[in-house]
Amino acid sequence: MYQTPPLVDFKWHPTSSLLAAATTDSIHFIDPFQPQTPSIITLDKGLSTFDFSPDGRWLVTGHRLGDSPENFFGNVQVWIAPNYLRVAVFGDYRAVTQVQYSNDGKTVIIAYSTLSDSENVIQFRDATSWEILSTVKTGNLVSMKISPDQKTLITIPDRYSIKVWDLEKNEVRYSLPTSFSGAANCLAISPDGTRFATGHYDGSIILWDLEKGERQLSMQASGVVEGLAFNPNGEILVSGSSYQSTLIQIWSVTSGEKLRDLEGHLRGVNFLEFASSSQLLASASYDGTVRLWGIRP
């Protein structure tokens, strides 16, 4: 267990065994075998999101600045490992809410947010030249994920719908409406890209066929679903809950059966990430702790 300040983002480093946990102005690199002695790099304030290039050479951070909704603005910053020296800053009048590298490392996907719904977009930039390649107007954005083949974008634009985009045509392939009580809150895509899962305020977890948009399975978690993660081989799905529950729950994606509850966090669980090369699961909670779990299918 590792005690942290409030976290804004959370993921495993792609070429090491370190877990990176971001606060609003720093990233804590946590060694699973020595969690109490992390290395910490200090970044600019307003940090809201980050990602590493697949080769681990570059770190891209997104920032949200301003002291009220009316004057939020932001920027994207580029840092080079191992000392994480900043080499570029791209300012914008919009807040940056999510950044993500493509699997091949050639593209950086950036989500921007403002009070003007028409200006809330996802931008695709060349990771070398930083030229804007394309832009998708998503409207208000709660969450986004890119499929492993980079051909599909899934967004939760307003919690009451789920949109699946064809990135080759830059258009919505299909939409999945949700109810007021079952508003969508988070999502995860399976490692093979054939299905995706959504977590909802009413505690439901729904597994969907990505190509057809058909519902495959429904599960019922013990509280509002705040986080979802598939394990590396896609055989299990892990959910984190809040409000009515502080549990992490493990589900079979074949049967929908709940396999196990993980107890330990004292408040809701809002981040879950599997290490890509092992069955090690990292979780973060509103209780200010990061916990590591060994998970077997």
Image: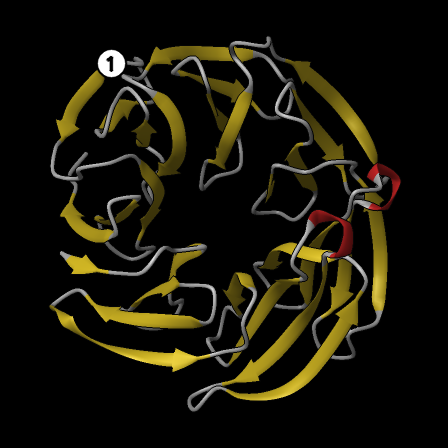
Position in image of residue 238 (x %, y %): 30, 32
Q: Is residue 222 above or below residue 76?
A: above
For image coordinates 69% across by 84% down, the residue present is 88
Which part of the image, by quadrant, shows the C terminus?
Answer: top left
For image coordinates 41% across by 63% down, the residue present is 23
- Helix, strand or loop status at disc 1: loop
Instruction: Please give the residue where the numbered disc 1 appears in the rendered image.
Output: 257
Q: Nearer the viewer, residue 64 or 249?
A: 64
For image coordinates 31% across by 41% down, the residue present is 231
- Horizontally, residue 33 falls left or right of residue 28, namely left
Q: Nearer the viewer, residue 218 or 65?
A: 65
- Horizontally, residue 197 falls left or right of residue 168, namely left
Q: Residue furthest front?
A: 67
- Amino acid at dot 1: Glu
Total numbered circles: 1
- Horizontally, residue 145 falls left or right of residue 280, namely right
Q: Is residue 160 above or below residue 63?
A: above
Q: What colouring style does the render use?
A: secondary structure
Which part of the image, by quadrant, shows the N terminus?
Answer: bottom left
Q: Quadrant of residue 263?
A: top left
Position in image of residue 53 (x %, y %): 53, 70
**Label 1 Cα neighbours within 10 Å, binned few <14 / some 14-19 / many ≥20:** some
Q: Nearer the viewer, residue 48 or 88?
A: 48
Position in image of residue 18 (x %, y %): 28, 69
Position in image of residue 199 (x %, y %): 45, 24
Q: Quadrant of residue 140?
A: top right
Q: Is residue 273 above or below residue 38?
A: above
For image coordinates 39% across by 55% down, the residue present is 7
